[in-house]
């Protein structure tokens, strides 16, 4: 923007004249909507109040709040690299959306550079700040849960825990080659709410970490904080990689209800054998399914646990298929069929995880530059992970509002491309800035603006 260029005429139409005019224009009008949602959540103000800023106050040019706002909003809009701030340095709407200042002052301010934002990641990754960033993500989730319901908080929540392998394209500290994925990865844990698709937690782990590594301490802590923040009764749903004895014992010691799948092995197959006999007679057209309540004690378990055996018929298969679920849910309130129905809803959680990776193009690129330790690199990349989940939460808040207003489903990618990526021209008067939206805003912006007051602030 602002560069002089000789006019260009495309060969398809000689009447067209293309030139760089230097006018105040943007293609990211939706950043103002995201700023409104982010302000209502109170997340930036909460972080700004609790983060420890190690900079010399006399040399500070960009507040922590404006830098945090820059990272979250740009990632929400698809600008995922720190260097993208330099690309957008003269975009007037980004100057307005990320600044702390009011009036026309932001248009005369410089935007933070790549180096400034890189130093911010280092600051956020310090031991005295990283927990605050985790709390910021949780605050965004609680705001999203309550914002469209007049502050009413849910009574029951199901917490899904899953791994989210992230490819790296270098030798970032802590990353490792993983044979299953055939790539060099980090192996973070991500926690989401099954009922709503909200991301409530993320924990970065080394690439060679076992599936359940750190799960026995991280999951109970997250459940406790979620319970304190919402008052809801929280159940945990986990996959086969997390049903080791340490994780199950940690949940039981804290009276946390859980449900998870067990990896099949000889002991379980022996237990299931009496139930794997096909009933007499011709099978019906629709495959059948049976659930059996059993008790089983693995070699590493201190006592028997409740196991639900699920036996299934498969088309064109003479043998019955079986898998196993372990749970501490009460038999009276949770008969086997209800336990199975709850577990099958894990598919929605996996879909939300996939949307985080596909829509936000998550990548963790902080590397060892010769002075950082592996722990420093891991801390910076954990901050990257958490900020990306924060960006998802802001987008998810607007997406839920848009779904209520339009009564149709929206993916994050579709919402960004059709609603947020709208061109606009800015007109600056003495004390007022007018944003003239392009025609593409006519279809969805009226509905969204009518519903925006429903995104109430977190109390």
Image (cartoon, rainbow, N blue to C red):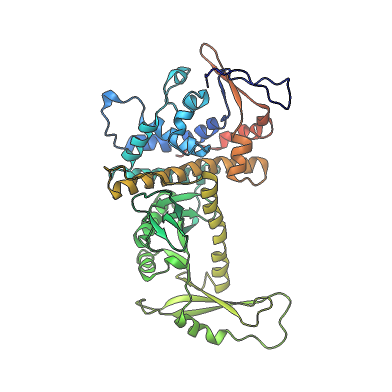
Asked if residue 11 is positioned above or below residue 254 in the image, the reply reads above
**Residue 435 location, x and y as percent?**
58, 22
Asked if residue 450 is positioned above or below residue 278 in the image, the reply reads above
Q: Residue at x 65, y 83 (%)?
A: 318
Q: Nearer the viewer, residue 92 or 130?
A: 92
Residue 36 visible at all:
yes
Q: Residue furthest front?
A: 11
**In the drawing, does residue 68 fall left or right of residue 451?**
left
Asked if residue 362 is positioned above or below residue 274 in the image, the reply reads above
**Residue 292 location, x and y as percent?**
55, 79
**Residue 294 location, x and y as percent?**
49, 80
Q: Residue at x 50, y 51 (%)?
A: 154
Q: Nearer the viewer, residue 405 or 180?
A: 180
Q: Residue at x 52, y 41 (%)?
A: 147
Asked if residue 140 is positioned above or below residue 315 in the image, the reply reads above
Name the quarter where the C terminus is drawn: top left
**Residue 425 location, x and y as percent?**
59, 21
Residue 142 visible at all:
no
Q: How many marks?
A: 0
Q: Residue at x 26, y 34 (%)?
A: 54
């Amino acid at each position: 923007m602002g560069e002089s260029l000789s006019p260009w005429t495309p060969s398809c139409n000689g009447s067209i004249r293309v030139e760089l005019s230097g006018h105040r224009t943007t293609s990211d009008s939706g950043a103002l909507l995201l700023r409104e949602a982010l302000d209502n959540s109170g997340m930036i103000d909460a972080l700004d109040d609790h983060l420890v800023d190690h900079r010399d106050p006399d040399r500070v040019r960009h507040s922590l709040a404006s830098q945090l706002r820059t990272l979250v909003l740009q990632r929400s809009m698809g600008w995922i690299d720190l260097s993208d701030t330099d690309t957008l340095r003269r975009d007037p709407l980004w100057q307005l959306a990320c600044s702390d200042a009011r009036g026309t002052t932001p248009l005369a301010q410089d935007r933070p550079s790549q180096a400034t934002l890189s130093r911010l990641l280092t600051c956020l990754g310090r031991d005295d700040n990283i927990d605050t960033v985790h709390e910021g993500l949780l605050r965004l989730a609680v705001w999203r849960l309550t914002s469209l319901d007049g502050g009413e908080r849910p009574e029951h929540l199901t917490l899904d825990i899953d791994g989210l392998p992230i490819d790296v394209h270098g030798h970032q500290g802590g990353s490792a080659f993983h044979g299953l994925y055939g790539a060099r990865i980090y192996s973070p844990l991500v926690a989401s709410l099954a009922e709503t698709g909200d991301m409530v937690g993320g924990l970065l782990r080394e690439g060679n970490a076992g599936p359940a590594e750190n799960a026995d301490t991280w999951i109970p802590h997250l459940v406790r904080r979620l319970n304190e923040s919402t008052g809801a009764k929280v159940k945990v749903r986990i996959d086969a990689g997390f049903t080791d004895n340490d994780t199950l014992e940690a949940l039981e010691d804290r009276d946390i209800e859980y449900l998870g799948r067990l990896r099949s092995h000889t002991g379980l197959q022996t237990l299931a054998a009496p139930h794997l006999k096909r009933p007499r007679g011709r099978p019906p057209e629709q495959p059948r399914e049976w659930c059996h309540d059993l008790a089983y004690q693995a070699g590493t378990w201190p006592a028997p646990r409740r196991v639900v055996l699920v036996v299934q018929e498969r088309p064109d298969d003479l043998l019955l298929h079986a898998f196993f679920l372990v749970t501490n849910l009460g038999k009276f309130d949770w008969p086997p069929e209800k336990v199975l129905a709850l577990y099958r809803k894990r598919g929605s959680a996996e879909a939300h995880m996939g949307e985080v990776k596909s829509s936000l193009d998550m990548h963790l690129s902080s590397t060892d530059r010769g002075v950082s330790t592996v722990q420093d690199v891991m801390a910076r990349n954990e901050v990257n992970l958490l900020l990306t989940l924060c960006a998802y939460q802001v987008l998810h808040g607007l997406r839920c509002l848009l779904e209520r207003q339009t009564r149709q489903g929206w993916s994050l990618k579709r919402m960004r491309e059709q609603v947020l990526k709208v061109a606009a021209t800015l007109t600056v008067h003495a004390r007022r800035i007018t944003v003239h939206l392009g025609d593409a805003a006519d279809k969805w912006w009226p509905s969204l603006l009518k519903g925006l007051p429903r995104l109430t602030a977190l109390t």
